[in-house]
Image (cartoon, grey):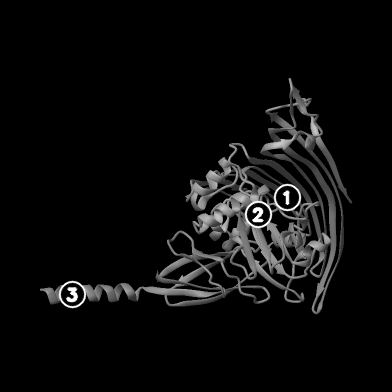
Amino acid sequence: MRVFWMSMLAMIAVFSAYGQFNVDGKVVTATGESLPGANVWLNQSKYATSTDGDGYFMMSKVPAGTFELSVSFVGYETYTKVLQVDQDVSLEISLKENVIKGEEVFVYATRANDKTPTTFSNISNKEIEGRNMGQDLPFILQHTPSMVVTSDAGNGVGYTGIRIRGSDPTRINVTVNGVPINDSESHGTFWVNMPDMASSVNNIQIQRGIGTSTNGAAAFGASVNLQTDMPSQEAYAKVDNSFGSFNTWKHTVEMNTGLINKKWAFQGRLSQITSDGYLDRASADLKSYYLSGGYYGDKTTVKAVVFAGKEVTYQAWWGTPEARLNNDVDGMMEVIANNGLSDEQADNLLNSGRTYNYYQYDNEVDNYQQDHYQLHLSHVFNPNFNVNGALHYTNGSGYYEQYRADDDLADYALPDVVIGDSTITSTDLIRRRWLDNDFYGFTFSANYSKEKWDLSLGGAWNKYDGDHFGEIIWAQYASTSAIRDRYYDNFGKKT
């Protein structure tokens, strides 16, 4: 009986396999280039997959029958075909570019290609999504060549930075949709001001060494060019939540209307990221939003983009001494002596372990908000010639708060305090150093590409107006200071 039933099962398996087939193929562009990451599925069935790095796909054990095959990829028209499956099927599918592809006109003049004499890497939307766990963009990009990233808090949330080929952030040109992001005074990029920006980025190009630029010398070391999300073919909404070490939470809500009447599209995102940080007290509370809406005509595209970030980050700027990492008591005593640490500060260093943070005041925070507004216009005259322009405005306002022990009153233009026979020349105090700045302008380019020719002509005009000032919000001995008195004023203007 056992032999009988085993024989029957084998026959059933043979008959089942006989009615199953493979559906495979390759997805390419109209020019024959592979499309990795394209979605492939048989409608109203469980069979779905995506193309690999070379554009190939396979669905196995598909039963005999008639199916509607669909293939989609952002920036291309969805391909559909009625498929009769009664044997193994192999296909080569060519997707036509959709008008949405024209959004690349926005960043054309700042993007390198195979004709450009510079080394570059492209990071796709799929790669960004796979790495996006709430950390700042430098940590999402850290696996690209020649890049070193840092994190003040030790976990990639809050203040982070990058170096590319050894060049510091002041020589790395960062743009979003071709609009410059670098601070006009320090020329660095503060990624903490754009929390969860990765959730609204479609692709990124990193150029190593001198490359294309919209703001001059910053491109000496490298360029990082971000292209924000493009409309999807269909509407969707998404909620993304994640939890990780050091009490790190990420909450994101997204929506996309898809193309409405094949002409209009709108997108939105709300995000909050919180973390205690690896270092003591190195917490971060980050909030952001992203909105975009646009008209996508056959030749003309108009798109408005608004995004903003609000961050409250506990300061951890000093780092941890090597002696503390190695539990070297003699080395830590040298650190205490060389830096004139107080008894309280010395106790903090000697007893904090590897998570040591120099700052101990409970509100030693950076509190800053930055709002970005962009309006883009592009027009395609023919397949070889297009023009684009963008108006932009960025407003940033906020402060960092510091506790200062035994500061001289004279450093704040305050007279000494006389109490009876005693003259007090210094005091403990808490101060805030403010920045309230505006940055605005426009960029434009005309682009021609045909066969061996690849030409761009463009320019930009930008203006920066920054107001720096400091306030003492508490002092043990206040002298003649009054609330909201400014102990310094400084104005930075650049055109």
Q: Which residue is mark 2?
A: 231
Q: Local crowd at mark 1 within 10 Å, few (<14), some, or many (≥20)?
A: many
Identify which amino acid the numbered label 1 is placed on: Gly
- Please provide percent x and percent y for residue 488: 81, 37
Taking the spot 81% from the left edge, 44% from the top edge, the residue there is 438
Q: Closer to us: mark 3 or mark 1?
A: 1
The reply to whether the C-beta atoms of the residues labelled 1 and 2 are less than 8 Å apart is yes
Mark 3 / mark 2, whichever is N-terminal: 3
Residue farthest to the left, as pictured = 1
Residue farthest to the bottom, as pictured = 452
Q: Closer to us: mark 3 or mark 2?
A: 2
Mark 3 / mark 1, whichever is N-terminal: 3
Identify which amino acid the numbered label 3 is placed on: Met
Identify which amino acid the numbered label 2 is placed on: Pro
Q: Local crowd at mark 2 within 10 Å, few (<14), some, or many (≥20)?
A: many
| Gap between marks 1 and 2 measured at Cα | 9 Å
- Please provide percent x and percent y for residue 361: 60, 38
Label 1: element kind: strand
Label 2: element kind: loop
Tell me, for residue 294, which label it has, or none.
1
